[in-house]
Image (cartoon, helix red, strand yellow):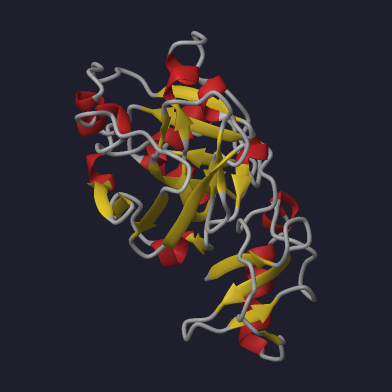
Amino acid sequence: MKLLRVGAPGKERPAVRTDDGRLLDLSSVAPDIDGAFLASGGVDRARAAVAAGGLPELGTEGLRVGAPLARPGKIVCVGLNYRDHAAETGAAIPPRPVVFMKDPGTVVGPYDEVLIPRGSVRTDWEVELGVVVGRRARYLESPEEAAAVIAGYVVSHDVSEREFQLDYSSQWDLGKSCETFNPMGPWLVTADEAGDPQDLGLRLSVNGVKRQDGHTRDMIFPVHEIVAYLSRYMVLQPGDVINTGTPAGVALGLPGTPYLLPGDTVELEIDGLGSQRQTFGQA
């Protein structure tokens, strides 16, 4: 099942995308797609409502697609989780996941404008597989237990300002938490439809030039291992998002470091999870 939210910012309504591309209004099933929806069996209710028929169809012309999940409780990120990305940045392969947090307020829709911060000279791109937590989780003991708490997956764009991230603080949060720095969507694909999270290709281009072309099989720490690991140090709640790292091809690791400028357009996609397109503006 593909769940999404459509409408003007702050006025999104929940919807489901059918296999033939129609959008069905889920407002009669739940007020929004958020942690409460996931925790209360919302996915099963939505699936039953679609099967029963009768949900009104939404017209798509001119309809904005928002982030598929209302503001997450927290966004937990894993850095340097692809071998080729660690190599291009000159970093050693980490013995344990590199974990940092990102402000949940950075989440915007998959086609919304992204703002380059004032004073920025090193704004960078990162296509990532986002994991959406569907059940409260603590002290998970196995990959199987971790898989059971995952509601689904999203395309997540972990936009980064490298000077803020690497030069201004010993923590990475400053360069990760600028406004609009986490486009998400277009939809939340439930775990049963997404399939094996270690069998997904990720791609990103800037102004039509391919920059990233990776695969989740190259993760240093696989998705289920990440979820179990995080649950030992923090309680994961329904509606939390985990950004699982990016493959090689970011501006930081490219010759000439071609960082983003106002007017640049970034397009990104993950197999089976949809695509995004953002034009960058100036804050």
Query: Considering the image in quadrants, where does the C terminus appear?
Result: top right
52, above or below 2, in the image: below
Can you name the residue that lies furthest to the bottom here? 54
Q: Position of residue 265 (x, y in %)?
A: 41, 52
Confirm whether residue 21 shows in the render: yes
Residue for point 65% across, 84% down = 59
Left or right for 34, reference 4: right
Q: Position of residue 253 (x, y in %)?
A: 25, 28
- Quadrant position of residue 267: bottom left
Query: Which residue is nearer to you in this view: 215 or 39?
Result: 215
Residue for point 45% across, 11% down = 167
Query: Which residue is nearer to you in this view: 173 or 94?
Result: 173
Residue for point 48% across, 52% down = 279
Confirm whether residue 232 shows in the render: no
Query: Which residue is nearer to you in this view: 48 or 254?
Result: 254
94, above or below 22, in the image: above
Left or right for 85, reference 175: left
- Quadrant position of residue 128: top left
Q: Position of residue 163 (x, y in %)?
A: 44, 18
Residue for point 38% across, 36% down = 245
